[in-house]
Image (spheres, rainbow, N blue to C red):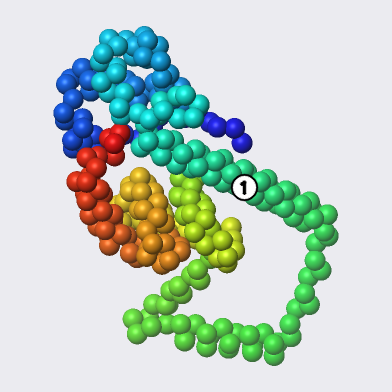
Amino acid sequence: MSKKKLPYFKLYTADWLSSASIKLMTDLEELAYFRMLLYSWQMDGLPSDPERLKKLIGLNECLASSVQRMFNEDKDGKLRNARQELERSFSQKVYKQRVLAGKKSAEKRKQQSKDLTNVQRNMHNESEPEPEPEPNKKEKLKYSLCQKSKTSDEENDGGEKKKKKPKHNPDTYKYSPEHMELSVLLKELILDNHPAHRKITDRDLERWSNTVRLMVERDKRSLDEVREVIVWSQNDEFWKQNILSTPKLREKFDMLAMKMKNQSSLNRGNSGGWFDGD
């Protein structure tokens, strides 16, 4: 699959505002840096030639050169920002997973529609069943007594019938494509970390997606929060051995989010922010 040029990239405002490197820039240098990030995302890298770079961002050559340290020159001669390229790689992976999940969903709907059509055709072709012979009086009396006994057993002290709890039906799982996307993301990361892991079936993904929906609707987590915790957990040496499903992710979410935040704060203290070039 060829690379899809995505029209957006994630910019973490807290990291930008807390970056030591950005705080030391002048207003014009910060503007130049921001423009360079935008063009780099759009063009898959910047030209390394200072004159071309100057014309591209519309600022003087000296200003462009002062923030060029935030980018590294790759083998193809283009300048790229390390953090931005991580976001590009992650976004491409999510896009591919979304396309794959969409194709599987379309194939499943097509097959369900085909099966339904076959059932309707068979029902139409079948002749009406012959009526059952009317039971004799003894059988009628026996049936009536059984029904009365069953009704009596179902009544509670207040005289009302007890409501039977409906059995859980796996087909009642509810989720959106966004919930499925996160489930597929977790599946791919788990298989990357554990190639010998048991097969994760489509039914597993449906159950996982339903859990993601509950995390969003009941636990009030945003999709971005869930995605970040999934990625972090599968890059942590301890948690990638333990978070092997979305139900387990939901159970440990608060602890994972807290540890991720603490680690992020520590990393920012050491490196000055995600969008630093150093």
**Which residue is painted at 62% across and 47% down in the image?**
104
**Which residue is painted at 49% across and 59% down in the image?**
193
Q: Is residue 31 above or below residue 175?
A: above
Q: Is residue 77 above or below residue 118?
A: above
Q: Identify the secondary structure beneath mark 1.
A: helix
Q: Is residue 226 visible?
A: no
Which residue is under mark 1?
Answer: 104
Name the one closer to the observer, 182 or 114.
182
> Where's the C terminus, which quadrant?
top left
Q: Is residue 269 above or below residue 37?
A: below
Q: Badge 1 local density, few (<14 within 10 Å), some, or many (20+)?
A: few
Task: Locate residue 61: give its quadrant.
Answer: top left
**Which residue is painted at 46% across and 64% down in the image?**
244
Task: Locate residue 10: give its quadrant.
Answer: top left
Name the one closer to the observer, 81 or 15.
81
Name the one closer to the observer, 253 or 174.
253
> Where's the N terminus, which quadrant?
top right
